[in-house]
Every structure is written in structure tokens, then in C-alpha cells.
Amino acid sequence: MFEIKGKVAIVTGGANGIGKEAVKAILNKGGIPVIADFNEELGNQTAKELNAEFLKVDVSDENQVKDMVSHVVEKYGHLDIMIANAGIGGGGSTLDLPTDEYEKYIGVNQNGVFYCSREAIRQMVAQGTGGAVINVSSILGLVGSAGACFYNVSKGAVRLMTKSMALEFAPFNIRVNSVHPGYVITGMVNEDVAGAEGIEMLKSLHPLSKGLERLGKPEEIAHAIIFAVENTFMTGAEIVVDGGYTAQ
């Protein structure tokens, strides 16, 4: 098992939701998480609450990602875990989507994950001690959804990007896996879904939600992320935590 204690981890999108729960889980295991997020106010608040470092980072900016990794390595001496979790959601007709809006989704959800993974792996190769990279995709990186073409594209790319990196860097003992959450109650879902009626509609899409009478929780996704970090014989895998959504 990959021992998290004493390991340095970057968690993008770490100020709230799934990312925040991953930060908490790493702290609970004795790791050293660095919170990276675009939301400076929330990032500072979470850092103060959890007693962790916060860096304001726009993951769609390649240079900011490089600077983030450089800062962490200069301060802590090494980087062992990258959890590329930052993302944006939404929906809309393919025909009505402005090109600049499409590029925004690609910039954060696809390019951002690529930049974070690549720069983390670059450092891990140089260290020669292996490492773990977890790319957070979505169930919509596995199956299509009408009115979510741009989101499907960005999250689907993460799935195959992960597999390619896993194969390329397995000889360096660097494991790269993707996690695919179903709909989880986070700030992103609450912004995208219109009120209680929308939440009930989402529940109807997840078989387990009928028994649990709820959607997924961020900590349930964080558990899967930590499992992927710790499992030393898992790479190139896609871990689906979706209440049965994709089993239908």
C-alpha cells in the first residue's frame, strides 16, 4: 500500500466539495495537502479551517500550473500525489453554444487536468520515487448526455488521457487513475440544477438514490480517490462512484 503519511499532495479545486473532502482525508492520514483553487476567498477560508496551505491557481493557465508545482517542490522538497479535481459544469444546446464558452470548458476540464498531470509527472520522474496521479472526470466522461456535448468532450478526454499516461509512466512506478463521480451535492450541482425539483430529477437517475433518498456525498468520492492513491497495483483504471447511474 502507498503510504500517504508524510507525502505531499496538490489538490486542485480543493476549496470545497470533493476536493475539500480529499484534502481532509489526506490530512487524516498524515499527509501534507496543498489546496489549489481559483476561488481565493473560499480557498483562504478552507485553508484556515483545515490548517493547510492555499494557492490561488487557474488550472487553464499552463504557466500558473508550472509555478504551482515549482512552489510546492521548492517549499516541501518533493511532490508525491496530484489530485486534478478542478472543473466547471453546465449544459446547453450544441447549436447555441458560443465557441468561447466551449473553449472555457476545454480549458479547465481538459487542458487543466492535462497541465496538472503532466507537471506532476515531470517532477515525479525527476524524483525517481514514483507517485500517484488521480484525474477526476465524471460519469459524463463515460456516457453521453443530450445538451452536454461540451462537458462530455472535456470529461471524456480525461478518461483516455489518464490511460495513456498510465501506460507511458508505469515503468517509473507512477500510477495514473481516473475517478468518475455521479451527481453529488456540491456547489457545482446546486448552481446547475434548478431547486428541489431538479434535485429530485437527478435522484431518479441514480438507482441507489431511490433507497438512500439522496444523491452522492463529496466524502464518498473522496474515499474512492484515496483508494486509488493507496492501491499500488492499480493504474489506468476508471473508478466509477455513481449510485448505479452507468449500470443502466
Image (spheres, rainbow, N blue to C red):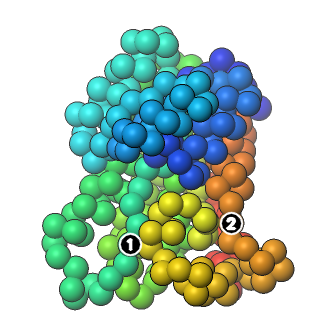
To which residue does mark 1 refer? 90
Label located before the other in sequence (2 or 1): 1
| Kind of element beneath mark 2 | loop
Q: Quadrant of the C terminus?
A: bottom right
Residue type beneath disc 1: Gly
Asked if residue 123 lies left or right of residue 138, the reply is left
Disc sitting over residue 4 in the figure: none
Q: Using the rendered image of the protein, determine whether residue 234 is visible from the camera's viewpoint.
A: no
Q: CA distance from mark 2 to mark 1?
A: 18 Å
**Residue drawn at (48%, 11%), measured in percent from left and top?**
77
**Residue drawn at (41%, 67%), measured in percent from left and top?**
89
Asked if residue 28 lies left or right of residue 177, the reply is right
Residue type beneath disc 2: Gly
Q: Quadrant of the N terminus?
A: top right
Q: Quadrant of residue 48?
A: top right
- Extreme left residue here? 99
To which residue does mark 2 refer? 216
Query: How would you rate the neighbour count of disc 2 (Cα within 10 Å): few for under 14, some for 14-19, many for 20 or more?
Result: many
